[in-house]
Image (cartoon, grey):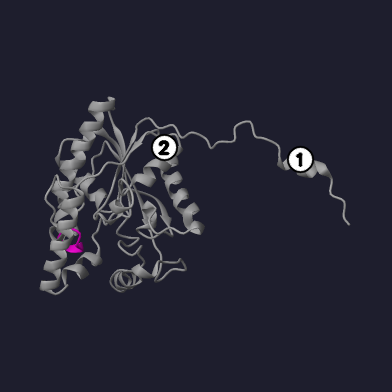
Amino acid sequence: MKWIEPQKYLKKLKLDEFPQPDIIQLNHPVLLCHGYGSMSMLMKPSPMHDSCLRLRSFGIQAFAPNIVPYATIEIRASQWAERIGQLQEKYGYEKFNVIAHSMGGLDMRYAIHNLGISSSVASLTTVATPHHGTSLAEIVLTTPELLKEKLNELMNWFGENVFPDQKSNAVAAVEQLTRKYIEEIFNPATPNNEDIKYFSISAGVGKGTKHPLNPILRLQNQLIYQKEGVNDAFVTEESAVWGEHIGKYSLSHLEQIDLQVSKERKPLVNQMWLDIAETLKENRL
């Protein structure tokens, strides 16, 4: 029998002086903005709640409030602006590093340009935001009229029950996510602010990649791929690029916000959020 020196085992038991991960110190707190939809609100206090707690575990002051889940960009943007004012009044913050998922990125671009909050925003990092629209919205809008009307009623009913402070309009919101609307109307009218840093994250899984995807999302992933290419089952890699592109990740749209994430893929989600935090730190934001 081979003799193993006890010192080798003892080395593994040696304690680090500082075993916890490093604190990521930012100059401004983080505001997390969620996208379209409300189903995740059945499972957690807010769609970005888990992401918020992860940032707090990095030592970052972060907040993930809720706004109306189904509404136009203009209405949603006004509510994000309101949330900023509420946090400033409560804590005395001057500016925020905003991290926005999906439609939340369009909301914040609109709010920055149109609602007088540019002086309250140090940076905007968008995660899988359809900056050039998504064909998924066009697919939804081609649903037979009667079915589309019933789905709109159902989503509005659900949205107004989980967030009764604002009337929902699910179809009107989807109309603003089409490629035609974003490219021809929204983008020309919503330029970047030169005093704010813009970063973006893109993602691709499923069709056209080697990365796994929940079977529930497979059909829409394939339909978007046929029209636009590699995507995260909601938004293509190309559409998500805006400002300085800081990373492309093999995560689905839902995995990015800690939904439908397997144990094996948790480290990928953690790495994405760590990279975002480190980028903000490196840019002294």
Secondary structure type for disc 1: helix
Q: Nearer the viewer, residue 110 or 76?
A: 76
Q: Earlier in the sequence, mark 2 or mark 1?
A: 1
- Left or right of 173? Residue 45 is right
Question: Which residue shows up at 39% across the image and 62% down it?
Answer: 204
Secondary structure of the residue carrying numbered label 2? helix
Residue 257 in sight here: yes
Which residue lies under the disc numbered 1?
A: 10
Q: Quadrant of the N terminus?
A: bottom right
State the image coordinates of residue 40 (x, y, percent, origin top left): 30, 54
Mark 2–mark 1 CB contact (< 8 Å): no
Instruction: Answer whether residue 119 is visible to the viewer in this image.
Output: no
Say which of 162 and 188 sits in front. Answer: 162
Could you tell me how far apart the alpha carbons at marks 2 and 1 are, in whole angstroms?
34 Å
**10 Å neighbourhood of mark 2: few (<14), some, or many (≥20)?**
some
Which disc is residue 107 wearing? Answer: none
Direction from residue 56 to residue 171 in the image, left or right: left
Image position, residue 11 (x, y; %): 74, 40
For residue 56, the mark is 2
- The span picked out in magenta is 175-180
* The quarter of the displayed image where residue 79 is located: top left
Q: Amino acid at mark 2?
A: Arg
**110 or 56: which is nearer to us?**
56
Residue 117, image x, y percentages: 20, 35
Q: Is residue 32 covered in magenta?
A: no
Say which of 261 and 160 sits in front. 160
